[in-house]
Image (cartoon, rainbow, N blue to C red):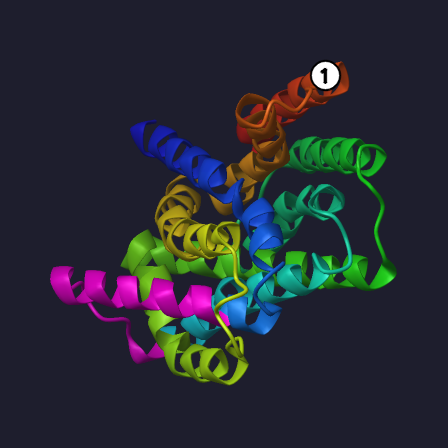
């Protein structure tokens, strides 16, 4: 029971941290090229991860783990950040929530394929209902989008679900912060090269909000969030804890209401309540 509760608690903290990722990316991509933003955030996070590995000296991954670490790097270090940065040049942050609502399903499916998990059939009912609620709410409250942005988000969700499931499976043996740190280190040479090739010609035109956005996605979205998220998936189960991502869009909207003073509609409260019930049901049958 303590192991399960710890997994869901860690996963919940991870979701809260990830809730700011897309808004921060949206702000940063206004001044930074998408390729540079993707590589720079990975480069900064890799340096921090390398410092952790050097200081704490955990057990090194086995040679057979390199393939799985490469999948993690492809999915969450390079794939999802780059594809979402490209997508957010075509669609609004609100419209992207349509696809974030599908991420728990993607994670659950790859948890079955890669993590050998077998949720009960009722789990898929709650998972599908939660995803449909998020998608419907986001669709009717978004500003619309473009086909290119939609296709990029679909690809991003698939790669991210794969990276989540693969990393969670490895975390059961290596530990959450170790997995993301090793994956970042594996991707470091390529990310450093891309950052050098795509850096802005001038830094003078880059505003403070863009720098803050880069700092957030580098430190929190790319490293700290994964420390909690992978631990949560490893302890509580990939399919079950993955459903906590259904709450992610509402955290972002609530933050906008509290910090920015934006109105919070009753439909958001109603949808959030239904999603909470879906998460509880998914937890029960995962």
* Mark 1 crowd level (few <14, some 14–19, many ≥20, 10 Å Cα): few
Determine the residue positioned at 72% across, 37% down: 131
Q: Is residue 185 left or right of residue 195?
A: left
User: Nearest the camera: 146 or 224?
Assistant: 146
Residue that label 1 marks: 270
Can you say which quadrant of the picture contains the C terminus? top right
Would you place residue 157 above or below residue 62 in this image? above
Q: Is residue 256 left or right of residue 222?
A: right
Q: Secondary structure at mark 1?
A: helix
Residue at the limit of the structure toward the front, as seen here: 204
Write the residue at 32% across / 63% down: 181
Above or below 194: residue 281 = above
Read off the magenta span: 39-64
From the image, which quarter does the N terminus lie in? top left
- x and y percentages locating residue 266 in the rendered image: 74, 14
| Rendered residue at 45%/69% (across/down) | 40
In reply to whether residue 58 is colored magenta, the answer given is: yes
Task: Measuring from the top left, give residue 100's x and y in whole percent.
Answer: 66, 45
How many marks are shown on the rendered structure?
A: 1
Q: Is residue 65 above or below residue 189?
A: above
Please identify the quarter of the rendering in which residue 285 is found: top right
Does the magenta-highlighted stretch encompass residue 55? yes
Q: Quadrant of residue 146?
A: bottom right
Report the residue at 36% width, 62% height from top: 45
Of residue 215 and residue 98, the one placed in the foreground of this image is 215
Magenta residues, dominant SS class: helix
Task: Point out residue 76 in the picture as x, y percentages from the top left corner.
Answer: 51, 62
């Amino acid at each position: 029971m303590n192991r399960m509760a710890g997994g869901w608690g860690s996963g919940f903290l991870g979701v809260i941290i990830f809730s700011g990722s897309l808004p921060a990316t949206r702000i940063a991509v206004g001044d930074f090229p998408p390729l540079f933003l993707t590589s720079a955030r990975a480069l900064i996070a890799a340096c921090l991860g390398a410092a952790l590995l050097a200081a704490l000296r955990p057990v090194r991954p086995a040679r057979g783990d390199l393939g799985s670490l490469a999948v993690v790097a492809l999915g969450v270090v390079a794939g999802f950040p780059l594809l979402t940065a490209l997508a957010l040049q075509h669609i609004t942050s609100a419209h992207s929530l349509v696809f974030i609502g599908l991420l728990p399903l993607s994670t659950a499916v790859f948890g079955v394929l890669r993590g050998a998990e077998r949720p009960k059939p009722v789990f898929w009912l709650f998972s599908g209902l939660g995803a449909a609620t998020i998608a419907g709410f986001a669709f009717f409250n978004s500003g619309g989008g473009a086909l290119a942005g939609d296709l990029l988000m679909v690809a991003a969700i698939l790669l991210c679900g794969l990276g989540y499931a693969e990393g969670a499976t490895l975390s059961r043996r290596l530990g959450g912060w170790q997995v993301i740190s090793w994956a970042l280190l594996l991707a470091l040479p390529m990310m450093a090269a891309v950052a050098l090739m795509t850096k802005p010609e001038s830094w003078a035109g880059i505003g403070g909000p863009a720098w803050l956005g880069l700092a957030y996605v580098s430190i929190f979205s790319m490293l700290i969030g994964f420390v909690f998220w992978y631990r949560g998936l490893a302890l509580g189960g990939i399919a079950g804890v993955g459903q906590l991502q259904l709450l992610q869009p509402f955290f972002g909207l609530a933050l906008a209401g509290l910090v920015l003073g934006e109105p919070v509609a009753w439909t958001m409260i109603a949808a959030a309540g239904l999603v909470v019930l879906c998460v509880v049901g998914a937890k029960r049958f995962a």
